Amino acid sequence: MNLFFREVGDPDHPPIVILHGLFGSSDNWLTISKVIAEKGYRVLLVDQRNHGQSPRADTHDYDGMAADLHEFIVEHQLDQPVLVGHSMGGKTVMQYAMNYPNNGLPSDFSKLVVVDIAPKFYPVHHGDILRGLSAIDLATLTNRNVADAQLAAYEPSPTVRQFLLKNLYRSEGRFDWRINLPVIIREIHGIGEELSHQRTVMEPTLFIRGSESGYIADADLPGIQKLFPNSRVETIEGAGHWVQAEKPTEFVQTLMQFLS
């Protein structure tokens, strides 16, 4: 799958590939990627399948998204990239590490950074958001303010609504979604599934969690350590699930300390 991506930084610098979370896109990481690039890295921001400007597919599972990432790394001839993933993207990079051990040879990535997600099962908790997005009548929609008002009946947070409505764009005189909403609705249970084909991942791995987020609980740490024995978990105080957006300075500091 020919994934859409944005690139920031010197092409000769060490590569970092960043994958967004559910309902997100490469655009969400553009500002912080410029800060990372200034630290001496080539940053590649990827739209995962059924998101952003990447192709749509009839399936949306982690084996498929890991295969997309593998194809991307091979196609762009990336040498030992650092793989960073937030939420759904974090599960993708973990699944990638499990699915592509390179037959016991050194892997084709150097390090993993998993942002606020564990390799465990998560029950569906985006029902209201999916119902709200589905309730927006694209055929009659005239502007974003109307869409925001319709979505507000399902999602009270203006910040979350603003994030979700970044997926709305105008095409040929009408609005459309940059997310493949029907497939995401159908596959939402799988997006929360526990990772499959589990193997021990020996590459250095950093888990970053927000102190105000419940996605990585203390009870999850033994399971993480079992699958990723060469890992550590760092907690950023005052941050929720969107750690990199809520505490960007602390996030970059934590990332750079790990990479150095």
Image: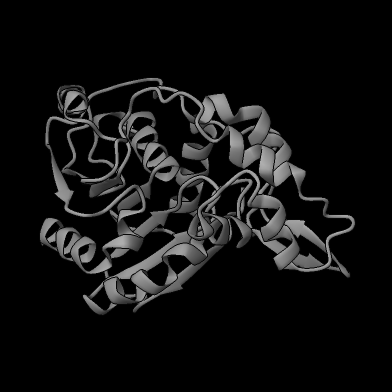
Q: Which colour scheme is used?
A: one colour
Q: How many marks?
A: 0
Q: Which residue appears at 64% of the width and 59% of the height? A: 53
Residue 47, quarter of picture: bottom right
Query: Is 5 on the left or on the right of 140, as rendered?
Result: left
Q: Nearer the viewer, residue 69 or 150?
A: 150
Q: Which residue appears at 23% of the width and 75% of the height? A: 40
Q: Percent x, y for residue 46?
A: 49, 57
Q: Quadrant of the C terminus?
A: bottom left
Q: As displayed, is residue 187 above or below residue 161?
A: above
Query: Is 213 on the left or on the right of 160, as rendered?
Result: left
Q: Percent x, y for residue 98?
A: 33, 29
Q: Nearer the viewer, residue 65 or 141?
A: 141
Q: As displayed, is residue 41 above or below residue 184?
A: below
Q: Percent x, y for residue 230?
A: 12, 36
Residue 166, quarter of picture: bottom right
Q: Which residue appears at 54% of the width and 31% of the height? A: 61
Query: Is 228 on the left or on the right of 24, as rendered?
Result: left
Q: Percent x, y for residue 126?
A: 54, 36
